[in-house]
Image (cartoon, helix red, strand yellow):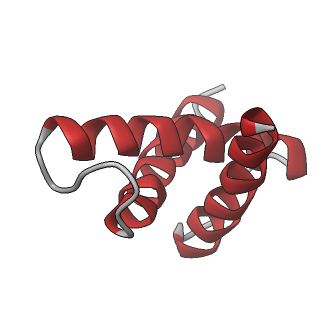
Amino acid sequence: MEILLWILFGLVVGVVAKFLMPGPNPGGLVMTTVLGIVGAVVGAWIGRVLGFYGPGQPAGFVMAVVGAIIVLGVYHFVTSRR
């Protein structure tokens, strides 16, 4: 059940990040979900390591979106160089 919640959370975070990221973004729904999940994990890890918030705090969503934007930016940079 927890995996399903991470997928749903990643989808929401990925859509928000894609909306906030300027320019054309490659990838469809599946790529948005994958990048959102990766971004959520990266953002949560960075936020906790830096001591911005603890488990279960609302700042985790913000850091997840920031992480997803970073991951989406890296993905966009890598795919546009081909």
The extreme left residue here reads 51
Does 16 appear above or below 69? below
Q: Position of residue 2 (x, y in %)?
A: 72, 37
Q: Position of residue 27 (x, y in %)?
A: 81, 46
In the image, taking residue 49 as reference, residue 3 lies left or right, namely right
The residue located at (68%, 55%) in the rendering is 9
Nearest to the observer: residue 76 or residue 8 = 8
The quadrant where residue 66 appears: bottom left
Image quarter of the N terminus: top right
Can I make out residue 25 in this image? no
In the image, taking residue 40 as reference, residue 47 lies left or right, namely left
The residue located at (51%, 42%) in the rendering is 39
Does 49 appear above or below 62? above
Q: How many marks?
A: 0
The residue located at (39%, 66%) in the rendering is 62
Does 16 appear above or below 44? below
In the image, taking residue 47 as reference, residue 2 lies left or right, namely right
Nearest to the observer: residue 19 or residue 76 = 19
The quadrant where residue 78 appears: top right
Q: Position of residue 20 (x, y in %)?
A: 53, 74
The extreme right residue here reads 29
Image quarter of the C terminus: top right
Q: Position of residue 23 (x, y in %)?
A: 60, 67
The residue located at (67%, 49%) in the rendering is 10
In the image, taking residue 57 as reference, residue 40 lies left or right, namely right
Can I make out residue 5 in this image? yes
